[in-house]
Image: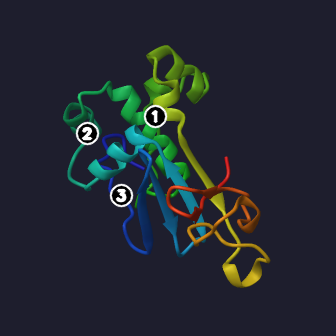
Amino acid sequence: MTSNPMPKAKTARLIVREIDGETLVYDMGRHAATCLNEFAAKVWRRCDGETSVAGIAAALSEDECAVWLALHRLTKSQLLMEEIALPPTMRTGKTRRQIAGQLGLGAAVAAVSSIVMTTAAHASCQANFTQCTSNSQCCSNVCFGGSGMCLPGG
């Protein structure tokens, strides 16, 4: 971990799909799915390994703290090549949600969620990102009608 990171997004062995303003990322190596809201996805796409956190914030016209919080969640979801630690100034003992709330970013930054799934061969239900026609067919019990695809549950 570095104090002045230039985050790099993981790209190998991923399936990425855009659905209704959210980005679904399935990591084939970990059998884990992550759902990124629009802001988190924009941060993730800017993680090229050459742009600093300040540079990402400037490119997105966002507060740098918001970018740090998104990077923190992306790290926990293992969507970055290296772990990114929050800077000491943000490690105040407050929760991520409390900090985001102070910035007015609760909904924007908090919407990074991941789940680990069984492979389709081990499941008696449909795995995420497979075709479906009803919720009961999906292990997550979420069949997204617009795409006809099983999606991770929330």
Residue found 58% across the figure and 20% down from its top? 98
In this view, the residue in front, 61 or 67, is 61
Mark 1 and mark 2: span between their CA atoms? 13 Å
Q: Which residue is mark 3?
A: 9
Q: Position of residue 111 (x, y in %)?
A: 53, 39
Mark 1 or mark 2: whose residue is earlier in sequence: 2
* Location of residue 60 (image quadrant): top left
Res. 5 mark: none
Label 1: how many Cα within 10 Å (few below 14, some 14–19, many 20+): many
Give residue 65's quadrant in the image.
Answer: top left
Tag 2 near tag 3, CB within 8 Å: no
Tell me residue 73's x, y (percent): 51, 43
**Mark 2 highlights which residue?**
56
Q: Residue at x 71, y 65 (%)?
A: 138
Q: Marks 1 and 3, Cα distance to the nearest angstrom? A: 15 Å
Q: Position of residue 95 (x, y in %)?
A: 61, 26
**Amino acid at dot 2:** Ile
Lower position in the chain sequence, tag 2 or tag 3? 3
